[in-house]
Structures are given as structure tokens and as C-alpha cells.
Amino acid sequence: MVVGAIASIGLYTGFLKDLARDGNPHGHDHSDLYHEESHRHEHDHDEDSHAVDGVTRQFYPTPEPDRVILNVTETPEKSLAVNWRTDTTVVENFLEWAVATSGPEFQQNVSRVSARKETLRVKHGDEPVIKANYFSAEVNNLTPGMRYVYRVGSSSGWSEWHQVRMPRPDKLAFIYFGDAQNDVKSLWSRVIREAYKTTPDVDFMLHAGDLINRHDHDLEWGEWFYAGNFIHATIPGVMTPGNHEYGKGVKLSPNWRPQFNLPKNGPKGLEETCYVANYSNLKVISLDAEQIDESPYYAEKQARWLDSVLTHDPRKWTAVTLHYPFFSTKPNRDNEKLRGTFKPILDKHRVDIVLQGHDHAYGRGMVNNVTAGAGVKDSKSGTMYVVSVSGPKMYDVSNDPWMQRKARNTQLFQIISIEGDKLSYQAYTASGELYDAFDLIKSGKRPNKVVNHIPSTPERQ
Ligand SMILES: [Fe+2]
């Protein structure tokens, strides 16, 4: 089954591109607002000039660490991976950590590691060059469930002490966000903050691609870090790239690898974009959707890799995230070839839930292809497919019956928790209203049982 699926990848390139490249070719895309904005400021800048205006200057680096982020690791119950940034005057930085104590006495028992440094120079359109030093460091052999504190920096400036609880083996919870992408500071910030307020004690936050709009626009990354602020430094992130994290020539955002510190355990060449994280009871997999779409080579690599990491996996639960949806919410979008190639692998290994973005609407359902026709679907499948959106850009939603619950024009975040044989899922709107809920229950070798708890709120059209 998988071999056949892999063989078909040869036919499978560029099909999503027309729909996907730079947003929606058939509708209004807010991305142009950013573009126009950049032309309004006609300044004469040299490389080191940071004098743009108050709005953008807040996103320039200083000697003090900023953009501090915790990243998921391959062994997230026992290790932490941190990333942060300073200006280029700072050449040496450290990560310090300790077991959290009830008072400030942890400071007497601090461990320190040196950070790796990478200098990044980025330029977007007519805007000035932004140069920064990005630092990354890891801590291993930590105790599951235990609280730690850490800070990053040097004598040139330190971050505050951030506090983090390591995941517990028996109980896990996380937040899932669809595309943030546009007006991230202005209109996405309330969504991540509401999510944090709703369930702050989660183990990770999952971002299903299109975190920003222009892959090489550092100031948009600045907005993303600004919006999440200390939440990024407190809860590890699982980031998968979308089409907007890629530029022409399938070029990954220059910021991606310097500013994140994600696992490098996927296919060679897809470090930090295609990877796996192993919790005791859950395997989380990020697939690089744009490289599936654009490159037969990387599509095949990812298909073989996915099959291999799912083979003989002892964990009860598996979640896959990728930006392009297996089943679309948008009218006239249908990623038939993605399904043809990767769905047999998900089916073979009984993947429980697939978390996606790209369609700028909400829809979820447990669906399958009917063998009689690729466009025909029925509801006998063990896998729950979800498409969601957290940012303000909105597309129409179709009436395709695969969706057991759907929404148009709604910013959402999802809270997913796993304990034993039960996965509980809730989708909340940006204003904190429960919009959708279900449980998945493991029942031996049969497909997961779905218990819907859909609130009586009318469907948002
Ligand atoms: Fe997208």
C-alpha cells in the first residue's frame, strides 16, 4: 500500500501551488497591506540603521535577549531547547537553569551552558537590513513533571527567569493554532493570550503553519514573538511551516532555523521542518507540507520516513500536523493527491488526529475516501481531521458533508488533552466561547469511538 503510494508521488508536484502561493489568488489577501506599508516609509538607511519609526523599532535587536522561545525536543519530557536573539554587539551568551524553588534560593544552585551563535542578516523589500545574533542551547536529563527555571543572556543583559513544568508521562495537554499569518500583533495576539488564559498549564503549543505572511519579513516574526511574549518562553512550541514560510524557489524563511531550535530527526535536508517528538503516550509529527507539494524528492522522503517512524511505535496516541489539509473546508479546493499519497500511511498506522491550516476556516470530521471515487467520502475512518484558523484572514467554507462541525469568519484556538484511552478536544472562539468539542476513545483494534459534545450554538456562517 505504502509502496504504491510512494510510486505515485512522481505525478504529484505543484498541485497546491496555484491555490497556495502568496495566499488566495481568488480573493482578497491582507498581505498587500504589509507591502504597501513598506513603501510608505522612504528612508535612507545604512545596514546598521535602526531608525525606522516607533512601530518597527520595537522589533529590532538590542544587547538584551528577546524573542526567547522554548521549542519541542525529540524527548520533550526530559529536555528543553531554547532559542533567543541579541544584536550583533553581543557575541557570547549563556543559558542558566535550576530546579524551581518557592523562594529565590534557586539562584544558589544554577547550572550554566554556553549557547551556539548564528548571525542572521535579513532584508525585506525597501526596509533596512536587520542583523542579529541568534543563540540556541539545550538542557537534557531533566525530570518529567518537575518545575525548572531558566534565563538567557550574559553580562550585557539577561532575560527574566522563566519557569517551565516538564510534561508528565501520564497526562498531556496542548493548544493547537491554525494560521496566524496576518495582522499578527494587532489581531492574533488576543487569540494566543485567550488560549493561555483558558488553559495555561499545557505541555506545548502547536502552530500548523503560516505563522506569518512574508517568509523574509523579520518584522512580522517580531509581531509573532510580541503577540506571544513570555508564553513562547514558558510553553514549548511545535512549529510546522506553511506555504507562507517559503519564498520563491521553495526557499525556507531565513529566520526559521536560526530562530527556532526544533528537532533534526526527520529526513536529511528537512531539519526543523519535518520531525518527530515522543511523549510517553503521544507521538507528534510535523510534516513539511510545502516540500511535499513542491518536491517529489522530499515528498517521497517524507512518506518513507513517516511510515518508518510509525512502524512499531508503542505509543497509544499519534498526532500529525501539516499545513495543507487532507480534506478542505474551502469550496473547490481538494488536495486529492496529498490524500492519495499520505492517507494510506495514516490509515495503515491508525493515526488518531491530523491538525492542519491553510484554508482559513474551521472544519473537522472523521472521514475516509470511498474506493469508488477519490472525491467521495464516508465517515468510517479512525482518523479525525481538523482545519482551523487563528488569525484574521477568512475564506468561505463549503457545504461538504465531511465536516461534522464547521465555521466561517471565526478565529479559534483548540485545547487537546490526553489521558489513558481518552483524548478530549475543545475548540474555542477568540472571544472564549466553546464552539466545538468531542472525545476520542480507544477501543481495541476498532477505529476510535467519537463522542461529540458539540454545543448548541448555531453554526457560524
Ligand atoms: Fe497557507
Image: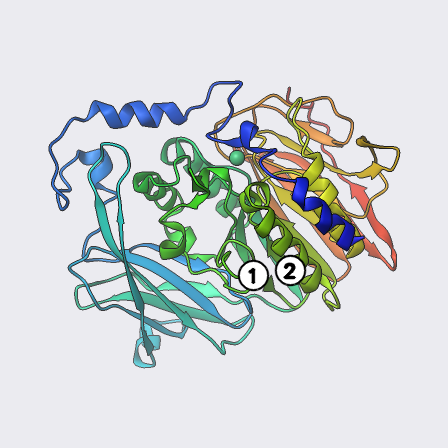
* Sequence-first tag of 2 and 1: 1
Q: Residue furthest bottom?
A: 109
Locate residue 399, reporting x and y percent: 73, 21
* Residue 41: percent from left, percent from top: 19, 26
The residue depicted at 40 percent of the width and 27 percent of the height is 31
Q: Against 331, is 58 above or below?
A: below
Q: Position of residue 417 (x, y in %)?
A: 65, 53
What amino acid is at disc 2? Trp
Write down the residue under mark 2. 305
For the question of whether residue 352 can be seen, the reply is no
Depth check: give the residue in front, 231 or 399.
399
User: Which residue occupies the foreground of this view, 396 or 9?
Assistant: 9
453 left or right of 247 in image: right
The answer to whether residue 148 is left or right of residue 284 is left
Identity of the residue drawn at 61% across and 56% down: 301
Q: Is residue 257 left or right of residue 16?
A: left
Kindly identify the amino acid type of the residue bearing the numbered disc 1: Gly
Is residue 74 at all visible to an observer of this figure? yes
Q: Residue at x 43, y 59 (%)?
A: 70
Contact, mark 2 vs mark 1 (Cβ under 8 Å): yes
Q: Residue at x 56, y 61 (%)?
A: 266
Numbered label attached to residue 266: 1
Q: Position of residue 343 (x, y in %)?
A: 74, 46
Q: Give the spatial CA distance, label 2 vs label 1.
A: 7 Å
The vertical placement of 453 against 6, above or below, is: above
